[in-house]
Amino acid sequence: MADPTPKPSGSFRSVPEMWHHRCHSVPDAEAFYSKRDGAWVTTTWRQAGEREREIANGLLALGLQAEE
């Protein structure tokens, strides 16, 4: 289970670690707003994390190696 406790910003070792903590600790919170067809649409941290995994898996499928 994800740790919902906020962590001080200096306690993360990397930006990806901070990203994953946020996606797992508050998955249903609003992360981003974007305009689609003239209307503002909300993206949650869960949706952002899912999209990040889709992109990462796509890059791996194209031959990019982890950590490249």
Image: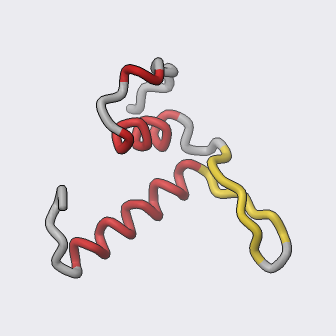
Q: In the rendered view, does 50 fall on the left or right side of 63?
A: right
In the rendered image, residue 16, in percent from the top left (x then y), is placed at 35, 44
In the rendered image, residue 66, in percent from the top left (x then y), is placed at 17, 60
Q: In the rendered view, does 22 fall on the left or right side of 43?
A: left
Q: Is residue 46 above or below residue 15?
A: below
Q: Quadrant of residue 64 in the image?
A: bottom left
Q: Quadrant of residue 59 in the image?
A: bottom left
Badge count: 0
In the rendered image, residue 47, in percent from the top left (x then y), is placed at 54, 58
Q: Tell me the residue at 22%/72% (across/down).
A: 60
Tell me which colouring the rendered structure shows. Answer: secondary structure
The foreground one among 15 and 29 is 15
Q: Tell me the residue at 38%/32% (across/down).
A: 1
Q: Is residue 67 above or below residue 19?
A: below
The foreground one among 67 and 3 is 67
Residue ranking furthest to the right? 38
Say which quadrant the C terminus sits in: bottom left
In the rendered image, residue 12, in percent from the top left (x then y), is placed at 36, 28
Q: Tell me the residue at 51%/21% (across/down).
A: 6
Q: Is residue 57 above or below residue 29?
A: below
Q: In the rendered view, does 1 fall on the left or right side of 68?
A: right
Q: Quadrant of residue 61 in the image?
A: bottom left
